């Protein structure tokens, strides 16, 4: 990080250009400087031999990735929120983790121990039976392992190259369903014929643990920061949050695995979950945001994106502005319904439940042709807003600009030769 910052400062001050930052180049520079940087102030000895080389390589890799994400965001080539210049990880705020790609990485035959570089052989809380069986049969190869701290526990996540069977294992290859995720119900699964197959209840783990969480937060506020009891109470809060996340992840994984294994085509909505969490100023907005976060609306789509490839099914993502909830699946009428759970169509008089109606409309969703306009599955045009072709326009028109307009790809990158 300091090296990248110094290169940029030299470029701004004297116009000195350097090579493009990469893991290989920065790692060479680090190897030349580590004897002078990693010195114990008390003994005067170098301490870097006591630490795994993967700890340094992982930090360099993260710095390089953060740098190029920043450059891509500045040039307008990276979607999503604007990315700033990379910064140092802060202890207690950022997640403690390290990735090992070389060295002794093994899953022991007893299925209760794993061997990690520098750490040695450690016992696991969970059985490694499935992974050890695939490795023993020659169907899997360990590429890397990431050790991270999750609350009060250490988690070892193995990155594995698995040989999966080529034949599809979907129970109903011809089945097409729409899945509407929500807060009242975790997911509603329906067919294009209007039949609701399943309503998966929402466990709402955060809501169930909210009473204990508030009590622990009040207890922590009465402690002195840095004291032993403050640390004990903070540990209880961390364990509670970890349990909430584990319960939520368990139910979402069960849902997505069942959908990918059962139905040939799964249609989900491309919700802007982050935008929904930014709503403020409305009545009950705080409790609504908490409920949206507790439901993990975006997790189902992310997990289905790779699980459908595993099991031979297909994932279809409906457009973000597709009116699934407010379109009557009987007469194709589109009307505003607000936050109502039940509503009546103003044209045909049909009575609808919000989630059931949305799931049926998603099952009938037809993908727009390449280059064509987006049309909903019931023939209603989908309202679109600004697209990527709609560039920024300054106030006063083009006559207010000085000089020619630079395209995003032509924007200069600091310290990198064009």
Image: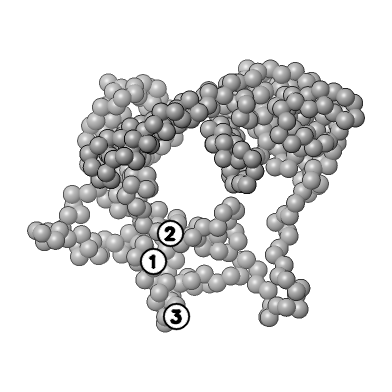
- Please state which of the two labelled residues, at mark 1 or mark 2, is closer to the viewer: 2
Rendering colour mode: one colour
How many marks do you count on the picture? Answer: 3
Label for residue 15? 3
- Camera-side residue of 287 and 251: 287
Q: Which quadrant holds the N terminus? A: bottom left
Most extreme residue toward the front is 222
Which residue is denoted by mark 1 in the rendering? Answer: 4
**Marks 1/3: CA–CA distance:** 15 Å
Task: Determine the image quadrant of residue 212.
Answer: top left
Which of the marked residues, 3 or 2, is nearer the chain's N terminus?
Answer: 3
Q: Which residue is drawn at 24% across and 30% down?
A: 122
Residue 84 place in picture, x, y as percent: 49, 60
Q: Is label 1 in contact with label 2 (beta carbons under 8 Å)?
A: yes
Is residue 283 in view? yes
Q: Which residue is drawn at 58% across and 43% down?
A: 277
Residue 303 place in picture, x, y as percent: 55, 33
**Marks 3/2: CA–CA distance:** 22 Å
**Badge 2: residue crowd in 10 Å (few <14, some 14–19, many ≥20):** some
- Camera-side residue of 272 and 207: 207
Which of the marked residues, 1 or 2, is nearer the chain's N terminus?
Answer: 1
Label for residue 86? 2
Q: Residue at x 75, y 25 (%)?
A: 342
- Please state which of the two labelled residues, at mark 3 or mark 2, is closer to the viewer: 2
> Up-down: is 391 above or below 101?
below
């Amino acid at each position: 990080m300091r090296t990248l910052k110094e290169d940029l400062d030299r470029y701004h001050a004297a116009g000195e250009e350097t090579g493009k930052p990469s893991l290989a180049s920065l790692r060479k520079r680090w190897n030349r400087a580590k004897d002078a940087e990693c010195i114990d102030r008390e003994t005067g000895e170098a301490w870097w031999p006591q630490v795994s080389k993967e700890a340094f390589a992982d930090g360099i890799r993260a710095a390089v990735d953060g740098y190029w994400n920043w450059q891509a965001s500045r040039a307008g080539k990276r979607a999503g929120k604007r990315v700033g210049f990379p910064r140092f990880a802060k202890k207690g705020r950022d997640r403690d983790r390290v990735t090992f790609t070389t060295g002794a990485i093994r899953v022991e035959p007893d299925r209760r121990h794993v061997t990690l570089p520098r750490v040695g052989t450690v016992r696991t809380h969970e059985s490694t039976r499935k992974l050890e069986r695939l490795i023993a049969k020659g169907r899997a190869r360990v590429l890397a392992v990431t050790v991270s701290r999750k609350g009060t526990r250490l988690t070892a996540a193995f990155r594995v190259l698995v040989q999966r069977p080529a034949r599809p294992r979907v129970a109903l290859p011809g089945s097409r369903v729409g899945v509407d995720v929500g807060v009242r119900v975790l997911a509603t699964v329906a067919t294009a014929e209007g039949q609701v197959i399943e309503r998966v209840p929402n466990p709402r783990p955060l809501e169930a643990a909210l009473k204990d969480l508030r009590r622990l937060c009040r207890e922590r506020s009465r402690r002195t920061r840095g004291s032993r009891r403050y640390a004990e109470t903070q540990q209880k809060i961390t364990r509670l949050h970890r349990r909430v996340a584990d319960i939520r992840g368990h139910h979402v994984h069960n849902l997505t695995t069942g959908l990918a294994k059962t139905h040939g085509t799964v249609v989900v909505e491309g919700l802007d979950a982050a935008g929904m969490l930014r709503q403020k100023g409305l009545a009950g907005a705080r409790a609504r945001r908490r409920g949206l976060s507790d439901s993990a609306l975006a997790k189902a789509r992310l997990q289905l994106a790779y699980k459908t490839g595993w099991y031979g099914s297909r994932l279809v993502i409906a457009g973000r502005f597709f009116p699934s909830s407010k379109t009557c699946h009987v007469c194709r009428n589109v009307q505003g319904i607000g936050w109502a759970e039940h509503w009546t169509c103003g044209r045909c008089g049909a009575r609808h439940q919000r989630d059931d109606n949305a799931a049926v409309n998603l099952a009938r969703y037809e993908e727009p042709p390449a280059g064509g306009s987006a049309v909903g599955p019931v023939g209603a045009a989908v309202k679109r807003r600004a697209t990527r072709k709609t560039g920024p326009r300054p106030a006063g028109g083009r006559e207010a600009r000085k000089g020619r307009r630079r395209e995003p790809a032509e924007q200069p990158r600091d310290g990198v030769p064009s």
